[in-house]
Structures are given as structure tokens and as C-alpha cells.
């Protein structure tokens, strides 16, 4: 592979990075006790089914973002700065319901010449899709030909255009709120958990981006005693032009609580938590922990 070919295959990434320079990313982080999620995953593996950590996060984050319309907005304007609701959020607010949440998932794939590139896929309706449906979509995105991913034709066009024209085309392509949501999603997810990475921070071009590290055994305190538990360090990057820290912390807290208090049905793959809003208290610190699926 020539250096020029490899550089051209990453042009769309460079256009995105140039475009994101106007953002004001701020980073938060939290340790997530993944005991219940890992028990669910183990039961599914025993039944011959695979569920990824990313799918659990997409499920949890989609439902939490549905209850936080302030995190489903984008920053607009220069001399007259303002925030604008994404169309999915605005449409649902007009009907008095929550929802309209799509996730942008970053994928490590190979380009036409074998070069390693970052591609993305937008998963619609993560606020209402079941865990099984989300996993099936993630699997299709990871296994399909990169040329068949949604938006692949636009990426190929950007990579072929001369850089000044490609940069302009990218900016025009994400200028309108509806186009922004269609191409970048409502929130973004990036995962390096398949490597020995505990913490990292990235910005996905949305008000909220989740950064997934590995799940590994760490020391936790339960009932005043040390114990080992599978823990994931989850990062959240928020655009300070859109959200303040307290609101972003509420979003992160809601996702942590959903994952730590997971109440999936181990007899099947739908994995629907019992609660509707994901606001059970997280079982952390000295809080008692009951058997899986039995509640506090």
C-alpha cells in the first residue's frame, strides 16, 4: 500500500477532526461494576449466544438519553451562539414522548487497500430496540463489507475529492440538524475495550460521547469488605457548548446505574431491565447486593 493511498483512505477522518475543532469537549469518567452484566453475558454464552459489552452500553445509553432532551441538542451559530434540538428529539417533544435516539458507533475496519481506518455506523432507535436487536445490528456492522456500511458511498466520495473540496463537502453534509443526526447520530460510542486500555477520551461530534475501556477485575468494597469484581472504566465526553457539567454528570450517572443494576432475563436474549427509567440506586460501596434478578 502506498503512503498516498493510505493517507487518502483517512481523509474523511481528517475532515471530521478539522470540523470538530470548534467544539469544547470536557471529559468525565466513572467506574462501573459490571457484575450483573457479566453474569448475563456468561449465561448467554452458555446458551450459545454472544452479547458484547458495547451492546449493553448502547441499550443503556439510548434509554438514558431519551430522558435527557438537553443532551440531544447541537451547537449552532458563531456571532449568535445557540443550541438547537436534533429533529428526532424535537419531533418527540412535540408529541410529548421521549425517544428519537440514534447512536454512532466507531468501527476499526480495513479500507479497500488493506489500510486500517475508522469507519462509523449509525444505529437507529437505540431508545426502543431490544438488546438482541442492538446486538444483531452491531454484528452486521462489524462483519459486513465496509463498502456496504450505511454512508459508505459518501465516505468513498470524500476520500476521492481533492482535500479543499472534500472538507467543504463534509461541512455541508453535516450542516443541517437532520443531516447531522442522520450521519453522526444523537450520541456516539467508541470502544477500545478489546485491548489493555483502561481509560481514553474521544469526541464523536455529538453532545455526548461514551468511551469504553476494558472490563477487568478490580477491588471493590461490599458490606465493608474488600472483594474482586469486574469493573469497566467508562468515559463520557460532553460538548460544553451544549451541556454543563451537572447535566452531563446526570447522564453518566444514569448509564452507570442502568449497567450496575442490570436485571436482564437470563432465560432469553432480550435483556430488558425491570425498571422503566433506569433510575434505581446504583449498588456501590457498602450497599448490599442481592442475587442476580432478585432486586435489592
Image: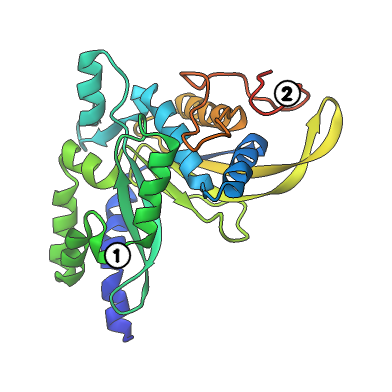
What is the image's colouring?
rainbow
Is the residue under label 2 in contact with that under label 1 (CB below 8 Å)? no
Quadrant placement of the N terminus: bottom left
The relative height of residue 11 versus residue 54 in the rendered view (above or below) is below
The relative height of residue 184 versus residue 208 in the rendered view (above or below) is below
* Residue shown at the point (46%, 29%) measured from the top left: 248
Residue denoted by label 1: 146
Decide if residue 85 is in sight here: no
Residue 44 on image: x %, y %: 57, 44
Q: Nearer the viewer, mark 1 or mark 2?
A: 2
Residue denoted by label 2: 290
Residue 227 on image: x %, y %: 82, 38
Residue 87 on image: x %, y %: 20, 30
Q: Quadrant of residue 225?
A: top right
* Residue shown at the point (69%, 18%) measured from the top left: 296
Name the residue nearer the viewer: 198 or 95.
95
For mark 1, give the secondary structure.
Answer: helix
Name the residue nearer the viewer: 266 or 88.
266
Among numbered discs 1 and 2, the one appearing first in the sequence: 1
For mark 2, give the secondary structure.
Answer: loop
The CA span between labels 1 and 2 is 44 Å
Decide if residue 274 is in sight here: yes
Name the residue nearer the viewer: 233 or 290.
290
Name the residue nearer the viewer: 96 or 53.
53
* Residue shown at the point (51%, 19%) measured from the top left: 275
The relative height of residue 52 versus residue 263 in the rendered view (above or below) is below
Residue farthest toward the right in the current orientation of the protein: 225
Q: Is residue 74 left or right of residue 259?
A: left
Q: Quadrant of residue 108?
A: bottom left
Residue farthest toward the top in the current orientation of the protein: 96
Amino acid at each position: 500500500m502506498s503512503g498516498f493511498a493510505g493517507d487518502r483512505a483517512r481523509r474523511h477522518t481528517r475532515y471530521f477532526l478539522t470540523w470538530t475543532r470548534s467544539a469544547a469537549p470536557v471529559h468525565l469518567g466513572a467506574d462501573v461494576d459490571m457484575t450483573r452484566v457479566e453474569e448475563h453475558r456468561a449465561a448467554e454464552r452458555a446458551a450459545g449466544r454472544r452479547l458484547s459489552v458495547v451492546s449493553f452500553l448502547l441499550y443503556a445509553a439510548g434509554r438514558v438519553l431519551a430522558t435527557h432532551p438537553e443532551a440531544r441538542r447541537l451547537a449552532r451559530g458563531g456571532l449568535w451562539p445557540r443550541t438547537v434540538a436534533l429533529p428526532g428529539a424535537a419531533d418527540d417533544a412535540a408529541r410529548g414522548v421521549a425517544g428519537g435516539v440514534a447512536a454512532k458507533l466507531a468501527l476499526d475496519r480495513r479500507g479497500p487497500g488493506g489500510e486500517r481506518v475508522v469507519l462509523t455506523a449509525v444505529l437507529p432507535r437505540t431508545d426502543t430496540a431490544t438488546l438482541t436487536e442492538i446486538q444483531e445490528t452491531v454484528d452486521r456492522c462489524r462483519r459486513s463489507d465496509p463498502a456496504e456500511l450505511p454512508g459508505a458511498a459518501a465516505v468513498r466520495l470524500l476520500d476521492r475529492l481533492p482535500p479543499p473540496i472534500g472538507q467543504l463537502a463534509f461541512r455541508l453534509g453535516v450542516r443541517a440538524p437532520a443531516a447531522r443526526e442522520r450521519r453522526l447520530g444523537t450520541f456516539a460510542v467508541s470502544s477500545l475495550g478489546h485491548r489493555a486500555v483502561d481509560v481514553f477520551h474521544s469526541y464523536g461530534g455529538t453532545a455526548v460521547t461514551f468511551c469504553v475501556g476494558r472490563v477487568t477485575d478490580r477491588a471493590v468494597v461490599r458490606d465493608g469488605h474488600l472483594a474482586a469484581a469486574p469493573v469497566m472504566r467508562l468515559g463520557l465526553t460532553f460538548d460544553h457548548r451544549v451541556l454543563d457539567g451537572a447535566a452531563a454528570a446526570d447522564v453518566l450517572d444514569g448509564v452507570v446505574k442502568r449497567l450496575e443494576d442490570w436485571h436482564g432475563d437470563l432465560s432469553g436474549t432480550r435483556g430488558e431491565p425491570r425498571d422503566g427509567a433506569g433510575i434505581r440506586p446504583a449498588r456501590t460501596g457498602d450497599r448490599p447486593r442481592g442475587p442476580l434478578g432478585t432486586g435489592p
